[in-house]
Amino acid sequence: MQKVTIQVPATSANCGPGFDCLGLACTLYNTFTFERIPQGVETDFEGKGSDSLPNGRRNLAAASFYSLWEELRQPPTGIRIKSHVEVPVSRGLGSSSTAVVSGLMAANVLAGSPLSKMELVTRATRIEGHPDNVAPALLGGMTVSILENGRVDSLKVDLAKPLQLIALVPEIRVSTAKARAAIPKEISHKDAVYSSSRAALLVAALLTGHYECLHEALLDKLHTPYRMPLIPGAEEALKAAVDAGAYQAIISGSGSTLLAYAPSDADRDAIGRVLLAPFAKRKTEARVYFLDVDHEGARVLSAQ
């Protein structure tokens, strides 16, 4: 086999209180085609923000491909990577995870698929650093993950009923490093209990269909209060989304994307408008995406 095309969904990490352990796959995708060539690394990316991605072996998709290809002791090869980018770059929707996952999936398929998706989650986490984006990108749905001694255990949560996701993506870059630096090294026991109890309630609500509990279950004190100032307009927008009919709205990953969880029959246009308004007032460009939960995760579109 010489060529494979992989499609990987965007992901929203943390899901409010599930810092570094919960993640959700969304119906927005990056598509990568990997083709073996005699030597070298060739990259060709198209789509918004793709011009900021590094080329050659420094590219995350290429580096991830070779990390597994060499682990599997495959023969030396060059690689040509073509990608269509739909997931906004550096906005808290897992764009880097799509690159990591695509590279690992491609290497695995071209090597004869010796590893399962679950085995790829651990390898993706070694590259990404934490499993909350890569696990749902590979497995789909919502995932609950733990990391212990370099090994990841992930469970996929099958949602009891449909859920609308309305994402507001402002033209504000919040690097993961900056977002993590904003979080204090220690928090109070009271705040830890606040968030851990809501993370448990969130998973229970999604499993049982009691989505009315999401209003409280998506609240958080581990990272959200500290990252909110990095996204001017976010606090106002999140509150407005709830007033417009969303169960609740959160910062997606480390930001700057905001994500509203809404009933399947909610007026998504109204929620989108109120999410946009605080940023329009500040003359910050932003875009709204209407999404659903992706239940499959990364998939092979074609293999030759």
Image: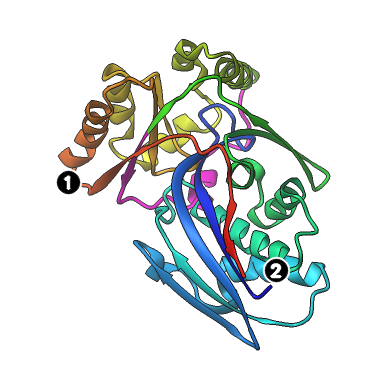
Front-most of 215 and 262? 262
Disc 2: which residue: 110
Rendered view: 187 above or below 87 = above
Crowding at label 1, few (<14), some or many (≥20) Cα neighbours within 10 Å?
few
Q: Could you say where residue 158 lies in the image, as x and y percent from the top left?
A: 61, 27
Say which amino acid is labelled 2: Leu
Residue displayed at 59% across by 29% down: 18
Q: Quadrant of residue 250?
A: top left
Q: CA distance from mark 2 to mark 1?
A: 47 Å
Residue to which mark 1 is pinned? 283
| Residue at horizontal 79 percent and vertical 75 percent from the top | 74
Image position of 224 (left or right of 71): left
**Quarter of the picture holding the C terminus:** bottom right
Residue 254's tag is none
Disc 2 element: helix
Q: Quadrant of the N terminus?
A: bottom right
Report the residue that reaches farthest toward the front: 304
Secondary structure under tag 1 reads loop
- At horizontal 77% and vertical 49% (from top left) the residue drawn is 119
Q: Residue at x 30, y 24 (%)?
A: 241
* Residue segment shown in magenta: 166-188
In the image, is residue 41 part of the stretch drawn in magenta? no
Mark 1 is on which residue type? Lys
